[in-house]
Image (cartoon, coloured by chain):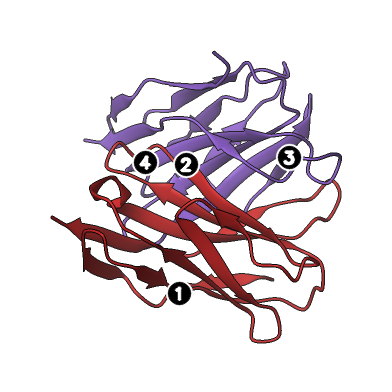
Chain colours: A purple, B red
Amino acid sequence: DGGITQSPKYLFRKEGQNVTLSCEQNLNHDAMYWYRQDPGQGLRLIYYSQIVNDFQKGDIAEGYSVSREKKESFPLTVTSAQKNPTAFYLCASSIIPGTRSGANVLTFGAGSRLTVL
Amino acid sequence: AQTVTQSQPEMSVQEAETVTLSCTYDTSESNYYLFWYKQPPSRQMILVIRQEAYKQQNATENRFSVNFQKAAKSFSLKISDSQLGDTAMYFCAFMFPNFGNEKLTFGTGTRLTIIP
């Protein structure tokens, strides 16, 4: 079955460490996104990518980095510069918005919960 | 910048009743997309319904329907014959089709509890 796989589901990090969250999709989607979810704040966009080797900052990119070396993969690194990294992280993908029917709809992974100790 | 506001942090309703969740948004654009997503306790985000702004007809999906008022910038979700499985966080979201720069902007969510 096609879908989005995020790993790990739970991750614990010591302060000062970088961690990388994995996101893999087999939907042949062009666009991929990373969102952060905090209680009472909804989902906020961190980074997004429309094509391989290109990505754009979202609303809260500071302290995060991404890469898009393959169409299927969009890993997110939470760096030590992120002051409050404890959160639930959601990866999503979509057909390039506006290109054809069914576009503009995001499919989400199951999420990764990051806790800083 | 577009903003999405959900003014009801929590709601509860008896099973089989009808409930309406509110959403307002702010944009200067005339063509855009609106969505309702559901996040059950599993935390998996699931698309409930989608509305294209240039379509005047309100979208419906089985027990779910929207009341889209473009002039008022309002996009409410009605759940009819509510079921226990409808218990979830519901997020309203907005997307402006700006080729190469599309982003989905979410509201803060409404936690809906269906009471047996």
Q: Which is in the foreground here, disc 1 or disc 4?
A: 1
Q: What is the three-letter code of the residue carrying label 2?
A: Ile
Q: Which is in the foreground here, disc 3 or disc 4?
A: 3
Q: Are marks 3 and 4 in contact (CB under 8 Å)?
A: no
Q: Which is in the foreground here, disc 4 or disc 2?
A: 2
Between A6 and B43, the one nearer to me in the picture: B43
Quarter of the image with the C terminus of chain B is bottom left
Chain of the residue displaying label 1: B
Residue highlighted by disc 2:
B46
Chain of the residue displaying label 2: B
Between B112 and B15, the one nearer to me in the picture: B15
Q: What is the three-letter code of the residue carrying label 1?
A: Ser
In the displayed structure image, the side of residue B30 where residue A110 appears, left or right: left
Above or below for A9 versus B84:
above
Instruction: Determine the CA span between mark 3 and mark 1.
Output: 25 Å
Find residue A64 and report its image quarter.
top right
Q: Say few, some or many: other residues with alpha carbon within 10 Å of mark 4 (under 14 / 14 to 19 / 20 or more).
A: some
Residue highlighted by disc 1:
B22
Chain of the residue displaying label 3: A
Residue highlighted by disc 4:
A88
Disc 4 is placed on an element classified as strand
